[in-house]
Image (spheres, helix red, strand yellow):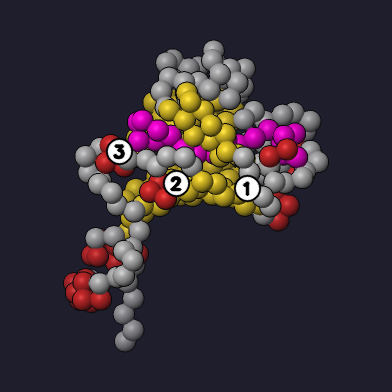
């Protein structure tokens, strides 16, 4: 009979695979995320509302993902799925950055306000130094062919975004379903030192911005080596 194996069986037996996974609901974020000071957030069953604050590029919240002192220079891939509430017709959606950080440097994407789509698309790459506020901010110009010439209409606003990061390769990509799919790839100036740990961090663009989130889902994988050891794989399969 043909024998089948689950992803978990293979990943744990071979020492590669999923390192972290969490679906972060509004309640989970309200209870577990490290919010900036005593931010008066509002948590409902299906969404969390984040009010305006005091400073440009101010931190909103942080979620630890991987502890320091565990990873070295492993090649990892970070995937992030973000659900946001659509604004009312004619209303703007304030720009918010979703980033991963080693404590010294943060890389990610800023979700843009739909009226800005015609300039830079639904998102733009961003990096900087994390903290109470994001400093040394660098916005990455969209690569040729990824700008989205878009005329604002609330009926077309995407409300789910997918992001993928390769910290060792200075690389990130973002995707949403607007106009049957829009992809953006960027290259960051600095990589992250995952031996110091890894966290999810979010930042506002303007102190007067407000945000409504439905969920965030994060996966972190250790990538397979350039060549998979056949003997090690066979031995792992025999133990399943």
Marks 1 and 2 close (CB-CB < 8 Å): no
Instruction: State the SS at label 2.
Output: loop
- Alpha carbon distance from label 1 to label 2: 15 Å
> In the rendered structure, which disc, 1 or 3, sits on the residue that comes first in sequence?
1
State the residue in front, 98 or 34.
Answer: 98
Where in the figure is residue 103, as x and y percent of width and height?
35, 31
Where in the figure is residue 130, as x and y percent of width and height?
42, 27
The tag on residue 170 is: 2
Residue at screen point 25% across, 46% down: 71
> In the rendered structure, which disc, 3 or 2, sits on the residue that comes first in sequence?
2
Instruction: State the SS at label 1.
Output: loop
- In this view, 232 is above or below 29: below
Where in the figure is residue 217, as x and y percent of width and height?
46, 45
Residue at screen point 29% across, 70% down: 228
- In this view, 39 is above or below 10: above
Marks 3 and 2 close (CB-CB < 8 Å): no
The tag on residue 143 is: 1
**Residue at which label 3 appears:** 197
Which residue sits furthest top? 54
Residue at screen point 34% across, 53% down: 75
Choose mark 1 or mark 3, whichever is in front.
1
Q: Is residue 40 left or right of residue 182?
A: left
Magenta-highlighted residues:
100-118
User: Residue 3's quadrant in the figure?
Assistant: bottom left
Residue at screen point 58% across, 25% down: 205
State the residue in front, 215 or 176.
Answer: 176
Q: Is residue 212 left or right of residue 60?
A: right
């Amino acid at each position: 009979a043909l024998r089948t194996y689950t992803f978990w069986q293979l990943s744990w037996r071979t020492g590669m695979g999923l390192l972290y996974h969490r679906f972060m609901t509004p309640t989970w974020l309200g209870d577990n995320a490290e919010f900036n000071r005593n931010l008066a957030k509002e948590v409902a069953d299906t969404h969390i509302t984040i009010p305006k604050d005091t400073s440009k590029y101010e931190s909103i919240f942080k979620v630890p993902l991987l502890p320091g002192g565990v990873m070295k220079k492993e090649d990892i891939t970070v995937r992030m799925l973000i659900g946001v509430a659509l604004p009312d017709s004619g209303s703007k959606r304030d720009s918010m950055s979703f980033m991963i950080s080693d404590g010294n440097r943060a890389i990610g994407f800023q979700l843009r306000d739909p009226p800005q789509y015609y300039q830079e698309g639904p998102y733009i790459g961003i990096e900087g130094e994390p903290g109470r506020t994001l400093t040394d901010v660098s916005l990455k110009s969209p690569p040729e062919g990824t700008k989205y010439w878009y005329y604002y209409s609330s009926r077309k606003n995407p409300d789910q975004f997918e992001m993928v990061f390769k910290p060792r390769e200075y690389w990130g990509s973002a995707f949403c379903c607007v106009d049957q799919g829009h992809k953006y790839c960027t290259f960051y100036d600095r990589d992250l030192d995952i031996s110091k740990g890894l966290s999810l961090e979010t930042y506002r663009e303007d102190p007067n911005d407000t945000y409504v989130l439905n969920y965030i889902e994060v996966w972190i994988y250790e990538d397979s080596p350039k060549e998979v050891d056949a003997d090690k794989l066979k031995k792992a399969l025999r133990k399943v």
